[in-house]
Image: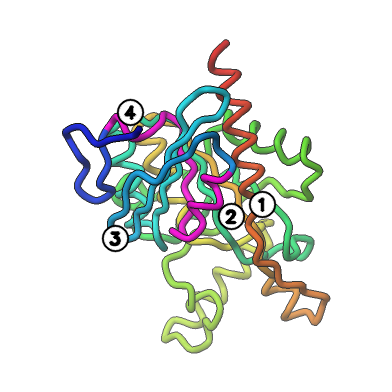
Amino acid sequence: MFAASGNKQYHIGLTKDQIGGYVIMPGDPGRVSKIAACLDNAEFVAQNREYTTYTGYLNGVKVSTTSTGIGGPSAAIAIEELIKLGAHTFIRVGTCGGMKLDVIGGDVVIATAAIRGDGTSREYLTPDYPAVADFTVVNALRQAAVANNLRHHLGVVQTKDSFYGETDPNSMPIANYLNERWQAYLKAGCLASEMEAAALFAVGLTRNVRVGCVLTSIWNIERAHAGLDNPEFHDSSRAITCAVEAIRQMIEDDKK
């Protein structure tokens, strides 16, 4: 049904006819089929490197899900090429580590903005320009979380490039810098740490498309340090539900 027809994008291996205007973007290619199962009549359409895509329908409108791999560079490539094919609304569905103590494993985190600790967003925005999510997408995600009785948080997340710079900062030559910065983020109320949101928000701002982000908190490193109960949670279904229902609502709102 979603056959290729000219102008295939180099990295994602897709053409305009194969994708919808609304795209759900997990990092993990293995999560794409789980998202596709929430769409109507979803079909596998392409796979290249870290980019796997399925396309189906919600409320009669074509919707796709494309994986981005880990980190800002590959995520930016995916969204740039999807934009070239006509996509206009994006939701990242990912995982995070909680930072604020009340973000526990299994909670849903809806990012309103991202601290730009990555390198990719610097190729798009000046250092003093914030990486913020689109309000329409944030609001749709919040409404979906409430409607589905999902314990959730709205606020700022940290985007970084080094996973081990977060989880094992004292092993790094710049340990003092990493630890001081982390403490500053905690004092400012940062909810969680992840690896793609800032880059995706930066592309969205630059290309004038709507981008949001919903994350599953796997655990909380600060709760671990404090000796508090710290359950681990690896089921992404809550965040997926939140993203799918947010897209469904935006489709209906856009029709109006």
Residue 221: numbered disc: none
Are the two marked residues, 2 and 3, in contact with CB atoms closer than 8 angstroms? no
**Alpha-carbon distance for marks 4 and 2?**
28 Å
- Residue 16's place in the image compared with 200, above or below, is above
Closer to the camera in the image, 44 or 21: 44
Mark 2–mark 3 Cα distance, whole angstroms, equals: 27 Å
- Type of the residue with mark 1: Val
Cβ–Cβ below 8 Å for labels 1 and 3? no
Disc 2 marks a residue whose amino acid type is: Val
Count of numbered circles in the view: 4
**Amino acid on which disc 3 is placed:** Arg
Mark 4: secondary structure = loop
The CA span between labels 2 and 1 is: 9 Å
Instruction: Tell me which amino acid carries mark 4.
Output: Gly
Q: Does 246 sit left or right of 175 as displayed?
A: right
Q: Answer with mark 3 or mark 4, whichever residue precedes in sequence.
A: 3
Q: Secondary structure at mark 3?
A: loop
Q: Which residues are magenta?
A: 16-37
